[in-house]
Amino acid sequence: MGKIIVGKISDIPQGKMQKVSVDGRDILVANINGNFYACDDTCTHAGASLSEGALEGNTVTCGWHGAKFNCQTGKLEKFPAKISDLKSYRTVIESDSVFVEV
């Protein structure tokens, strides 16, 4: 498993999220109360970019059809139909940089 730098801590303020590309994958990185979490950025329902949706607490809501996922675990929290969870990734903070393990 490799560790890829995705930015500086200051690039993603608390309560915000950002899409990054890591090894050809779009990954959402969220800063929740000073802790960083990463999961797939692509909604498993219709392929929307989740980073274009809304982040409230640890829940990201897809801007297209309202699917809600837990950013910390990638688990689906709410949607009328059963869709797949997101893959989540481990984040590592070193100095002032955020890394994602892929």
Image (tube, rainbow, N blue to C red):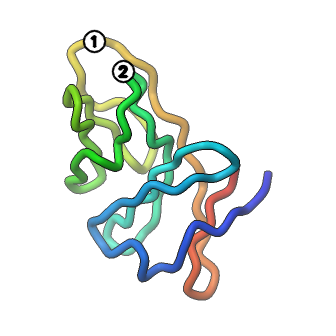
Q: Is residue 63 above or below residue 102?
A: above
Residue 90: % across, % down? 60, 55
State the residue in front, 7 or 98: 7
Q: Quick one: which residue is furthest to the right in this view?
A: 1
The circle drawn on residue 45 is 2
The residue depicted at 42 percent of the width and 50 percent of the height is 72
The circle drawn on residue 15 is none
Q: Quarter of the image holding residue 49?
A: top left
Instruction: State left or right for residue 80 relative to residue 25.
Output: left
The residue depicted at 25 percent of the width and 45 percent of the height is 53
Q: Quarter of the image holding residue 10?
A: bottom left
| Dot 1 amino acid type | Ala
N-terminal of the pair, mark 2 or mark 1, is: 2
Q: Is residue 75 above or below residue 55?
A: above
| Dot 2 amino acid type | His
Question: Are the residues at dot 2 and dot 1 in contact (C-beta closer than 8 Å)?
Answer: yes
Q: Quick one: which residue is furthest to the bottom in this view?
A: 95
The residue depicted at 22 percent of the width and 37 percent of the height is 63
The residue depicted at 35 percent of the width and 60 percent of the height is 17
Q: Is residue 81 above or below residue 33?
A: above
Circle 2 crowding by C-alpha within 10 Å: few under 14, some 14–19, many from 20: some
Q: Which residue is mark 1?
A: 81
Q: Quick one: which residue is furthest to the top in this view?
A: 81
Residue 13: % across, % down? 33, 75
Residue 101: % across, % down? 68, 56
Residue 23: % across, % down? 70, 49
